[in-house]
Image (cartoon, helix red, strand yellow):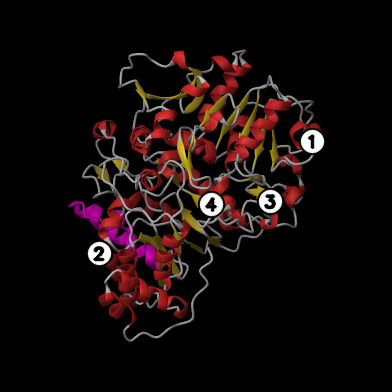
Amino acid sequence: MDIRKDTGLWLPTSVKEMKARGWDAVDVVLFSGDAYVDHPSFGAAVIGRTLESAGYRVAIVPQPNWRDDLRDFRKFGTPRLFFGVSAGAMDSMVNHYTAARRRRSDDAYTPDGRHGMRPDYPTVVYTKILRELFPDTPIITGGIEPSLRRLSHYDYWQDRLRPSILLDAPADILIYGMGEKPVVEIARRISAGEKVSEITDVPQTALLRTLDKMPENPDPAKDIILNSWEDALRDPGLQSANFKHIEQQSNRLNPDTRLWQAYRKDGVAVQINPMLPAMTRGEIDASFDLPYTRLPHPRYNGKTIPAYEMIRHSVNLHRGCFGGCAFCTISAHQGKFIASRSKESILREAKAVTRMPDFKGYISDLGGPSANMYAMGGRDRSICSRCLKPSCLHPAPCPNLNNDHRPLLEIYHAVDALPGIKKTFIGSGVRYDLSMHRTGNRDIDNANRRYNSELIEHHVSGRLKVAPEHTEDYVLDIMRKPPFKLFHQFRDIFDDVNRRCGLRQQIIPYFISSHPGCTEIDMAQLAIKTKQLDFHLEQVQDFTPTPMTLATEIYYSGIHPYTGERIFTARSSEEKLAQRRYFFWYDRTYRTDIERALRRLHRQDLIASLFARTVTPKRPNTKK
């Protein structure tokens, strides 16, 4: 039997599918802004399968229609325990809009990429509808969108400082970060008869409290009182100070400190309970080993879901990232401590991929949030327990960091040896500053050199994508990225392996314009340096401020939260375009404007460096 037609293998999405299981009602109904893909890369599927494995009856409503008579919100009736709400695997505003705030014409998480199948801020829209229809039923929200908006945050699309999303979305509890453990505990306690209003101590959750619940004389080791919403709104520097606390507490080894923020006008405070420690190997294995079909629900047969097509033959090795890049949200959501799967769990999933009917022998990605952080962390965990730094790699790799790539190489070799696998590719971003860092330990340094060599020789599908992000050291320092000279060194390794192995592969660098700290002169220097490397850039983007990142806080406040330094940031559309065009210096369309700008900036010398003896090639397709 073709499992792609057996709806009984998926969580029910309709009353008919629910009754086919012999159920008259469900314990939990999950609403998701994404199409339902039963795969461990899709959060709604993970939460649904986790609750199912804990013994609960779970239904899922993917992409409910919020513009009609709301029948999608009513169809399962009142669940025994609660409604769960997620905007989807991607922030809805990043999903919907470009860096220029223009509406996108497609949605990668929707069948056939169709746009318009979810509202802006689905977390807010869905919870308001459910609260009106079912005023007495608990609502739990989670996922990337509310996770990054759990406290006051700058919203780029509205260009203003917004309050916690809990002030707009009437949910009882917000789960931030990876939600498997909190959601099961909440389900267990509601099932045991506890009122949702009494569940105030679950780790990694946020909720609204009355102002009198805030500690009057807090112990800063247990409770941190952030600047209030009203004060942060009045003084952006106070929002910047808040961010430092939020980021530090999101990246602790053993979190035990609550955060509080008052909203005096509304008479409430947001209470943020401490983040959970990173999952143990057994816990993360249990999540990835759940009985996913790894396929979209049969309701989408004959349609293509672009986000699924990208990962259908991939295997994720770990969660977490200790890079701490200023523009990235991973550590705010997953934390910096790595939770790595066992080799046995990874191999079980890789074998499942080989059994997929359309598998042709190629694993598209054997990676993670950063491709090469598997099984890494601090050698002395007591040092890690005292550390509040958001990055283990900036300004230089931590002396306590174990960057031994041998466990990762062992995974590569074991997966490559499986019957039916012709080749595994590494599609996730590789931190070359991690694999190139010399430790002084001969065995580790030799293994890491071998990793770079094997990566380039055996795991590149013709083009290796890496992310230097910029060329100028001042900008890179704000980005928390390594100096550009390290990219030169890695490119030398890449070219050497290609020559030695008779390969004709390309290295494709990613770059960002308009990042805080970056000026037009910096972009001109980037253009000159990439020209000297014979690059005609393809993988580029304009900086988009997203909630709860260092770069966004600098963009909003103009202040670096850790140093207090005032930082220039291109904010207007004209300033951002002026920076972006340097990516395409070779396009005659931009040459006159670039020359005029450099004369205005009294840098005629850069004009000569950029345009002397050039041949104008055809501009590549830069659409991402």
Question: What is the three-letter code of the residue carrying label 3?
Answer: Gly
What separation in Å lies between label 2 and label 3 (alpha carbons)? 44 Å
Residue 416 spot, x, y in % from top left: 47, 59
Residue 40 sits in quarter:
top right
Name the amino acid, label 2.
Lys
Sequence order check, earlier mark of 3 and 4: 3
Q: Quadrant of residue 341?
A: top left
Residue behind mark 1: 71
Residue shown at 36%/46% (left/top)? 554
Disc 1 crowd rating (10 Å Cα; few below 14, some 14-19, many 20+) is few
| Residue toward you, 466 or 184 | 466
Q: Which residues are magenta?
A: 432-457
Q: Is residue 437 magenta?
A: yes
Please say if the residues under marks 2 and 1 sit with CB atoms less than 8 Å apart. Answer: no
Q: What is the CA distance from the residue labelled 2 to the residue labelled 1?
A: 58 Å
For label 4, count other residues whose C-alpha is less than 10 Å away and answer few (under 14), some (14-19) or many (20+). many
Are the two marked residues, 2 and 3, in contact with CB atoms closer than 8 angstroms?
A: no
Kind of residue at badge 4: Ala
Give the crowd class for mark 3: few <14, some 14-19, many >=20 residues within 10 Å. few
Instruction: Compute the Cα span from label 2 to label 4.
Output: 37 Å
Residue at mark 4: 350
Q: In this rendering, which labeled residue sits more in front, label 3 or label 4?
A: 3
Find the distance from the CA under tag 3 to the CA under tag 4. Answer: 35 Å
Comes first in the chain, label 2 or label 4? 4
Mark 4–mark 1 distance (CA, rounded to whole Å):
40 Å
